[in-house]
Image (cartoon, rainbow, N blue to C red):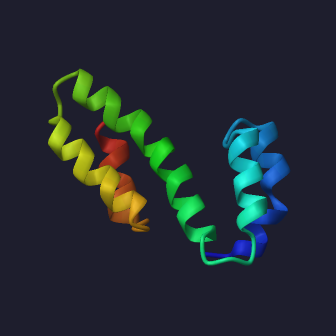
Amino acid sequence: MNEHRIIEQVDRMVATGRITEDEAGRLRAAEGSATFEEVVAGIRARHAQVHTHAAVAEGRISQSEADGLLHRVRSGEHSKELRSHIKGTN
């Protein structure tokens, strides 16, 4: 993960709606600390939850499956395979 690049793009990400002002503040506050990756994982989990919530509501996956996917994201996993799986649930 390129922390410097993420920080450089925070304002643009807020402007385009990719992250909230609160998330931007948490990213800036965590810059250079051990918690930066946790903040990023939380943001990624929020994005993933949009897909998993819809899939559960439509009966395509169980809540348990959704919880497992979100746990993996919150734990820092961000593989292409996991992202594809989550996006495929929507």
Residue at coordinates 40% horizontally, 39% vertically from top-left?
A: 49
Q: How many marks?
A: 0
Which of the pair 75/54 is nearer the observer?
Answer: 75
In the rendered image, the quadrant that contains the N terminus is bottom right
Instruction: Identify whether 60 is placed above or below 86.
Output: above
Residue at coordinates 33% horizontally, 47% vertically from top-left?
A: 86
Residue 81, x across and y down, in percent: 33, 63
Left or right position of 14 against 53: right
In the rendered image, the quadrant that contains the C terminus is top left
In the picture, residue 3 is in which quadrant? bottom right
Residue 21, x across and y down, in percent: 76, 40
Residue at coordinates 63% horizontally, 69% vertically from top-left?
A: 36
Q: Does residue 44 appear anywhere in the picture? A: yes
Which of the pair 88/23 is nearer the observer?
Answer: 23
Left or right position of 56 against 33: left
In the picture, residue 55 is in which quadrant? top left
Residue 89, x across and y down, in percent: 28, 39
Q: Does residue 90 appear anywhere in the picture? A: no
Left or right position of 71 against 59: right
Residue at coordinates 77% horizontally, 70% vertically from top-left?
A: 5
Q: Residue furthest top?
A: 58
